[in-house]
Image: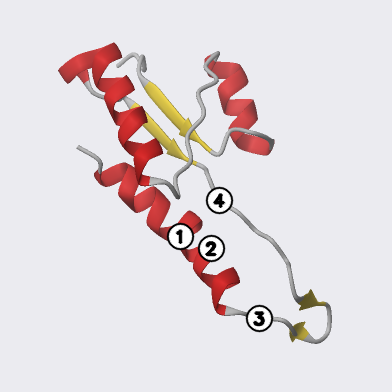
Amino acid sequence: MAIRNVLVTGCDYGLGLEFVKVLCKDENLRVDDDESIESVKNLIESQIGSEGLDLLINNAGINQNDGWVPGKGWVNLNRAHMLKHLNVNTLGPVMLTHAN
């Protein structure tokens, strides 16, 4: 089976960027933003219709060590920081995968 339709999230640097370079596609998607997810869903539908994606690489994620002190752990842990990580790293990929 030939892979023709691919969506890569988290492609601004690292592994995601390398996937994009190989696949020659550079679209921007914020997995923590429902409007961005809806927009990319509509873009995909307009480009490939009912053909669907052959591959989704859910690579988007954040790892901000705000408040992490080696040997002491989380010294400045707060709700907003944890919710941001949960939103991007857990809810974002689920919402993107579920978009229909």
Q: Are marks 4 and 2 in contact (CB under 8 Å)?
A: no
Residue 28, label in figure: none
- Which residue matches tag 4? 61
Residue occupying image coordinates x 60% and y 54%: 62
Q: Is residue 88 above or below residue 38?
A: below
Please, is residue 29 above or below residue 48 in the view? Answer: below
Give the residue at mark 1: 87
Residue drawn 34% across and 43% down?
Answer: 96
Q: In 3D space, how far apart are the residues under numbered discs 3 and 4 (Cα atoms)? A: 19 Å
Q: Nearer the viewer, mark 4 or mark 2?
A: 2
Lower position in the chain sequence, tag 4 or tag 1? 4
Cβ atoms under marks 1 and 2 closer than 8 Å = yes
- In this rendering, the answer to whether 26 lies above or below 15 is above
Specify the amino acid type for callout 4.
Gly
Residue at 55% x, 13% y is: 24
Of labels 1 and 3, earlier in sequence is 3
Q: Which residue is mark 3?
A: 77
Q: Which residue is mark 2?
A: 84
Q: Quadrant of residue 91?
A: bottom left
Q: Earlier in the sequence, mark 4 or mark 2?
A: 4
Callout 2 touching callout 3 (CB < 8 Å): no
Element at badge 1? helix
